[in-house]
Amino acid sequence: MERKTQIQAEQGKPDLTITREFDLPLALLFKAYEDPEIVAQWMGTKVLKWESKKHGSYAFETSDPKGNVVFKANGTIHEFIPDLKITRTFEMENSPFGVTLEFLEFEGLSANTSKLNMHVIYRSASHRDENLKLPFDYGINMAHNRIEEILNPQNKI
């Protein structure tokens, strides 16, 4: 699988950056992070709460085929500017990683392409490094690929 999503993590720093160019108009890319039905599709999860607004919050969970919850996450939205940016916290429940602060910036590149820039800050460099030991790179690439598959108008022909 080609990894279009790029992750930069400087040694010893408690943050990382994630960038990805999408074959989607800016409004559709932003909608993938705003609309709970679309979020559920590309994340393969059950959205329990999704308030796309300043001071809103969100929560979701993922279950295995037997219905056992294997992953839960939640957060608070601190800044929400349509088609431009979302600033939020992200917390995986029952994990040692703690809360992260995420700055998502959306940029239109052309009428049919856009870019997502994420800056993620962890409590410490060691927390970030432990998270990166998971299949983080693979997972985020898969998720971003799903966004394009679901929303790219050319895929619906």
Image (cartoon, rainbow, N blue to C red):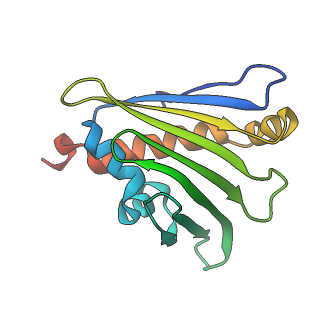
Q: Position of residue 15 (x, y in %)?
A: 72, 31
In this picture, residue 16 sits left or right of residue 14: left
In this picture, residue 44 sits left or right of residue 157: right
Q: How many marks?
A: 0
**Vertical position of residue 46 compared to residue 153: above or below:** below
Q: Which residue is pictured at 64% across the width and 52% down the height? A: 89
Q: Which residue is pictured at 39% across the width and 56% down the height? A: 34
Q: Quadrant of residue 63?
A: bottom right
Q: Quadrant of residue 27?
A: top left
Q: Nearer the viewer, residue 90 or 132?
A: 90
Q: Position of residue 129 (x, y in %)?
A: 81, 34
**Vertical position of residue 102 compared to residue 68: above or below:** above
Q: Position of residue 114 (x, y in %)?
A: 32, 30
Q: Which residue is pictured at 35% across the width and 45% down the height? A: 30
**Vertical position of residue 146 compared to residue 1: above or below:** below
Q: Nearer the viewer, residue 22 or 85?
A: 85
Q: Quadrant of residue 7?
A: top right
